[in-house]
Image (tube, rainbow, N blue to C red):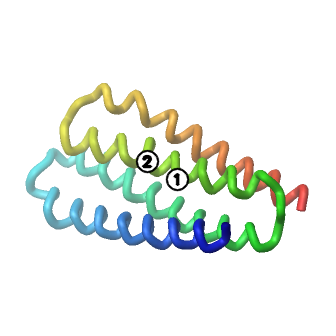
Amino acid sequence: MDRLFFGLGAALGAVAVVAGAFGAHALRSRIAPEMLAVFETGVRYHLVHALALLAVGWATTRWSSPGVPAAGWLFVAGILLFSGSLYALALTGVRALGLVTPIGGGAFIAGWLALAWAAWRG
């Protein structure tokens, strides 16, 4: 499990950096500033939670709680749903995609709570 979450964290971190560079260089002159801000919000949460996956990888070596892998999968789901919906919204302008964003935010919150629970249970 540790290598799985470390690998996912590293790979998703690389994707976040690519997305950030894409937003800064390719999108800056192509989309409205408010949509660029939406895209950048997606990148920020994506990168933070890619790093959180590295913490989950470490935590799997420390605690055997089922909360640890749950946190990891919730972070992955959050990246896909939260950041993915913001990327899609910024690129397409389809506002309905924003309805998915809070589900991803909920996954992030649940992931942090699962990780906290695992730490407290030790």
Q: Position of residue 116 (x, y in %)?
A: 78, 54
Answer with left or right where residue 100 lies relative to residue 68.
left
State the quadrant of the N terminus: bottom right
Residue 76, above or below 8: above
- The image quarter containing residue 91 is top left
Answer with left or right where residue 54 lies relative to residue 30.
right
Q: Residue at position x 23%, y 30% from top?
A: 94
Q: Which residue is mark 1?
A: 76
Q: Residues within 10 Å of mark 1 (few under 14, many from 20)?
A: many
Q: Residue at position x 58%, y 72% from top?
A: 6
Q: Which mark is residue 110?
A: none
Asked whether disc 1 touches disc 2, contact meaning CB atoms under 8 Å apart, the reply is yes
Q: What SS does tag 1 mark?
A: helix
In three-dimensional space, the C-alpha distance between marks 1 and 2, rounded to whole angstroms, equals 6 Å
Q: What's under tag 1, amino acid-wise? A: Val
State the quadrant of the C terminus: bottom right
